Image: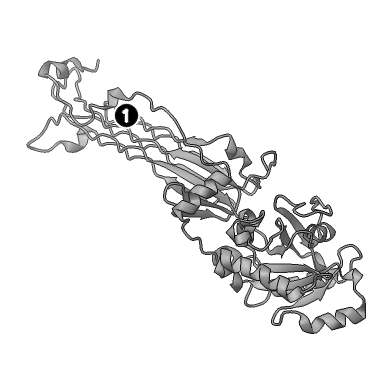
């Protein structure tokens, strides 16, 4: 997995900009010896912003850019001149990215649309200059506000791919073969377990120019929800899917039992997955004759549509696409709507989160040095001798 270009989990350190301090300045001109205060306000610190970008498919570009720093706001100056606002730091992420607090596991935000922006950390407000503090009884205020401090946060970005149909099955159930037969996707296919090591997406063409997106994830084994196999890492990718296509090989001893094992793993991982529409496909059915298919029909799970298919011979493929399209567009499950709007993100358990970070190789601590801002430490007190004010004269 270290050599894979598919990165769906990354930890980054974010820091917003601090606000600039207000200016303490007295206006002096040739014919205006007592012009009064004219110190300007400090600029706002830069925000840290997450922005959805459909041109990204993974978080690979953030793996080697772990620090997101916005710039600080500029200080105010004389003549009521405001300081320059800090530059925002925009982090481009693929649609379907979820952000969590790496320290507490708290859910922060979810980016689901192209161009959607969420302010992850706000920049500090700039301080007010002494011009704002003039009154009838205090005509020469010799103080100003400091800028608000910056904010810091270590964030976990987790990608949950957006797709209409998610394929669920044990290793070597024929998921990758099906995806390659109904779309232009070319996942790796081989006759050994866990051939698929990362999710694959494919666009499935239907009748009259319509289409939908299908997602293939690595095979799930019993105990995947507890961390066995590769399923735990990739189960989150089907949380967004509108419909789940369960795939069980036709030569399985007990199709119903295998289906229930898969269903129980999804329930253990996230009980809300049981609310999704489900379809059962019995794969590799080219090895079954009509008599055997009739014998298997009564043993199949009740309450969900099922179909016998063969990705190699094309048996039942068009009928499967018709069933999937019908289910996606049913009143209870409109295409593309339910998966994004109804997903509920739960906060992560801190203990499990630490283990998860370790498993993903994201448990290293960030180390960084702060710049020396000694010149800003006098923000709270501005006391000058009378002679200091007389030197500030505009020519």
The image quarter containing residue 307 is: bottom right
In this view, 92 is above or below 114: above
Q: Is residue 34 left or right of residue 332?
A: left
Q: Is residue 61 left or right of residue 257?
A: left
| Quadrant of the drawing holding the C terminus | top left
Q: Residue furthest left?
A: 137
Q: Is residue 337 visible?
A: no
In this view, 392 is above or below 260: above
Q: Residue at x 74, y 71 (%)?
A: 324
The image quarter containing residue 376 is: top left
The colour scheme is one colour
What x and y, as percent, mark residue 179?
79, 59
What x and y, as percent, mark residue 207?
82, 68
Q: Residue at x 64, y 67 (%)?
A: 242
What x and y, as percent, mark residue 103?
42, 47
Q: Residue furthest bottom?
A: 298
Q: Residue at x 9, y 34 (%)?
A: 138
Q: Nearer the viewer, residue 376 or 159?
A: 159
In this view, 201 is above or below 123: below
SS label for mark 1: loop
Residue on which disc 1 sits: 75
The image quarter containing residue 21 is: top left
Q: Is residue 175 visible?
A: yes
Q: Is residue 218 left or right of residue 172?
A: left
What x and y, as percent, mark residue 382?
18, 27
| Quadrant of the drawing holding the N terminus | top right
Neighbor class of circle 1 (other Cα within 10 Å; few <14, some 14-19, many 20+) is many
In this view, 137 is above or below 267: above
Q: Residue at x 70, y 42 (%)?
A: 4
């Amino acid at each position: 997995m270290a050599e894979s270009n598919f990165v769906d989990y990354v930890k980054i350190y974010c820091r917003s900009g601090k606000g600039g301090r207000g200016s303490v300045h007295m206006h002096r001109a040739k014919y205006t010896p007592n012009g009064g205060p004219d110190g300007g306000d400090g600029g706002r610190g830069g925000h840290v912003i997450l922005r959805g970008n459909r041109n990204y498919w993974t978080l690979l570009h953030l793996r080697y850019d772990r620090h997101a720093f916005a710039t600080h706001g500029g200080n105010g100056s004389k003549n009521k001149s405001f300081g320059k606002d800090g530059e925002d730091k925009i982090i481009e992420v693929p649609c379907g990215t979820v952000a969590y607090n790496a320290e507490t596991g708290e859910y922060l935000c979810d980016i689901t649309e192209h161009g959607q922006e969420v302010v992850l950390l706000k920049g500090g407000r700039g301080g007010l200059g002494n011009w704002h503090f003039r009154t009838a009884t205090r005509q020469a205020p010799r103080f100003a506000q400091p800028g608000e401090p910056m904010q810091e946060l270590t964030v976990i970005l987790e990608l949950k791919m957006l797709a209409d149909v998610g394929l669920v099955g044990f290793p070597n159930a024929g998921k990758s073969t099906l995806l390659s037969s109904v779309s232009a996707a070319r996942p790796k296919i081989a006759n050994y377990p866990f051939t698929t090591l990362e999710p694959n997406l494919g666009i499935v063409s239907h009748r009259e120019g319509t289409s939908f997106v299908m997602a293939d994830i690595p095979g799930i084994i019993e105990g995947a929800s507890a961390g066995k196999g590769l399923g735990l890492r990739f189960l989150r990718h089907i949380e967004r899917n509108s419909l789940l296509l369960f795939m069980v090989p036709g030569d399985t001893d007990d199709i119903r039992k295998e289906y229930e094992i898969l269903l129980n793993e999804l329930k253990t991982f996230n009980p809300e997955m049981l609310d999704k529409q489900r379809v059962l496909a019995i794969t590799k059915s080219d090895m079954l004759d009509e008599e055997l298919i009739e014998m298997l029909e009564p043993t199949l799970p009740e309450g969900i549509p099922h179909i016998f298919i063969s990705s190699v011979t094309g048996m039942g493929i068009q009928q499967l696409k018709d069933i999937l399209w019908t289910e996606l567009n049913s009143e209870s499950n409109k295409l593309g709507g339910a998966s994004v709007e109804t997903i509920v993100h739960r906060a992560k358990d801190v203990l499990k989160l630490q283990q998860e970070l370790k498993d993903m190789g994201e448990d290293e601590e960030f180390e960084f040095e702060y710049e020396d801002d000694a010149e800003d430490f006098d923000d709270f007190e501005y006391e000058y001798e009378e002679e200091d004010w007389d030197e500030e004269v505009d020519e």
